Image (spheres, helix red, strand yellow):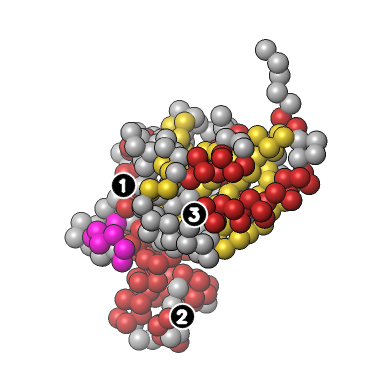
């Protein structure tokens, strides 16, 4: 059996967002050789989008693949189905219905294409290139505008029967609680622990405490960043916003731990920039709600990947994992 020279292989990692698409050529060590971006929302037809993607990326492929081969394409996208290679009814994309995206990409680029959702891709990226190197059991939680997750068990990403497993952000943490702005569900983790949820909590709390620094801001200026700025200045209300958020997150993480018994939970995204304001109450309430057999075993770890590049690395990991 011939050995494969990984040094002569390159993967194309693509992260599709509602507004922008980031892409990069990545080697097997996780080095991004070149990268770029195009607008996602400018193209009404997915075929036109893929044509533009091809036209933009082709010069990079020619530049870096003179002595290396393009091994494949990995794509992180909203509502991506790993098994079918499709994007299915993504609410923040212009292309409606079920899009055979991987098939269209393979046809255009001439190499295999795999895809999954962005949080699953992030989990693979951490396992190959980041803080989860060497781990076979961990849960990735992405805390941004929403809350995403990827579950690695026994070294394998859990996709479930239909490719959509791991929507931990939409699990209910407070029955009959806060109504989600998009799904309509009541009391989901995303409604509390996302940047959007933090802003909602902050607006509610500042109304109850007129002396809070948060009241110096206009309604539209209240976000997780401004809450963090106030917390750093010692504002008790802002600190309580993060404590409350950490409590809800920690209670949810306790359930997740008892479900899959991971060795670590990895946190990623802009929200974790709040540091100990968020992480200390999260850890406290996670441990407090665990059975004794799980206590003190699970590490709470922040991502080691650069936030700007993590999506590209995560998508490219789909190629390298096989």
In the rendered image, residue 213, in percent from the top left (x then y), is placed at: 45, 83
For residue 75, say whether it is visible. yes
| First along the sequence among labels 1 and 3 | 3
Residue 163 position, x and y percent, is: 38, 38
Query: 181 or 195, which lies in front?
Result: 181
> How far is mark 2 from mark 1, CA to CA?
34 Å
Choose between 261 and 63: the one closer to the eye.
Answer: 63
Residue at left 63%, top 50%?
Answer: 54
Q: Earlier in the sequence, mark 3 or mark 2?
A: 3
Residue 212 sits above or below residue 201 on the image: below
Q: Find disc 1 in the rendering and name its residue.
A: 289
| Badge 2: residue crowd in 10 Å (few <14, some 14–19, many ≥20) | few
The residue wearing badge 2 is 221
Find the distance from the CA under tag 3 to the CA under tag 2.
35 Å
Classify mark 2: helix, strand or loop: helix
Tags 1 and 3 in contact by the CB under 8 Å rule? no
Q: Residues within 10 Å of mark 1 (few under 14, many from 20)?
A: some
> Given contact means CB atoms under 8 Å apart, are the residues at marks 3 and 2 in contact?
no
Looking at the image, residue 284 sits to the left or right of residue 175; the answer is right
* Mark linked to residue 203: none
User: SS class of the residue under badge 1?
Assistant: loop
Instruction: Pinpoint residue 216: horizontal percent, then vertical percent.
Output: 45, 87
The residue stretch that appears in magenta: 181-188
**Mark 2 or 1, closer to the camera:** 2
- Judged from the image, the secondary structure of the residue bearing numbered disc 3 is helix
In the displayed structure image, the side of residue 194 where residue 121 appears, left or right: right
Q: Foreground residue, 77 or 242?
A: 77
Where, quadrant-wise, is the N terminus in this rendering?
top right
**What type of secondary structure mainly makes up the magenta span?**
loop
Residue labelled with disc 3: 46
The quadrant of the rendering that contains the C terminus is: top right
Instruction: In the rendered view, tell whether residue 183 sits above or below residue 168.
Output: below
């Amino acid at each position: 059996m011939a050995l494969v020279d990984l040094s002569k292989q390159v993967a194309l990692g693509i992260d599709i967002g509602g507004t922008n698409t980031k892409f990069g050529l990545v080697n097997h060590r996780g080095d991004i050789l070149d990268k770029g971006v195009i607008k996602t929302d400018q193209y009404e037809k997915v075929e036109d989008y893929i044509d533009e993607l091809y036209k933009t990326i082709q010069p990079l492929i020619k530049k870096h693949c003179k002595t290396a081969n393009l091994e494949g394409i990995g794509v992180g996208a909203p509502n991506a189905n790993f098994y079918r290679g499709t994007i299915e009814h993504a609410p923040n994309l212009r292309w409606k219905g079920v899009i055979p995206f991987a098939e269209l990409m393979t046809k255009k680029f001439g190499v295999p294409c795999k895809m999954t959702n962005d949080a699953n891709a992030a989990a693979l990226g951490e396992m190959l290139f980041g803080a989860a190197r060497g781990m076979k059991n961990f849960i990735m939680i992405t805390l941004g505008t929403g809350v995403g997750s990827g579950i690695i068990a026994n070294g394998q990403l859990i996709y479930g029967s239909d490719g959509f497993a791991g929507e931990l952000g939409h699990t209910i943490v407070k029955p009959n609680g806060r109504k989600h702005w998009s799904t309509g569900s009541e009391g989901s983790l995303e409604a509390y622990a996302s940047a959007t949820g933090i802003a909602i909590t902050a607006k509610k709390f500042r109304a109850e405490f007129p002396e809070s620094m948060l009241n110096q801001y206009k309604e539209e200026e209240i976000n997780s960043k401004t809450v963090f700025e106030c917390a750093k200045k010692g504002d008790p209300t802002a600190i309580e916003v993060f404590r409350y958020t950490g409590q809800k997150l920690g209670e949810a993480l306790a359930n997740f731990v008892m479900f899959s018994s991971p060795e670590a939970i990895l946190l990623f995204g802009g929200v974790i920039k709040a540091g100990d304001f968020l992480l200390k109450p999260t850890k406290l309430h996670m441990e407090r709600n665990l059975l004794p057999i799980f206590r003190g075993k699970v590490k709470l770890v922040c991502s080691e990947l650069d936030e700007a590049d993590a999506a590209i690395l995560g998508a490219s990991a789909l190629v390298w994992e096989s």
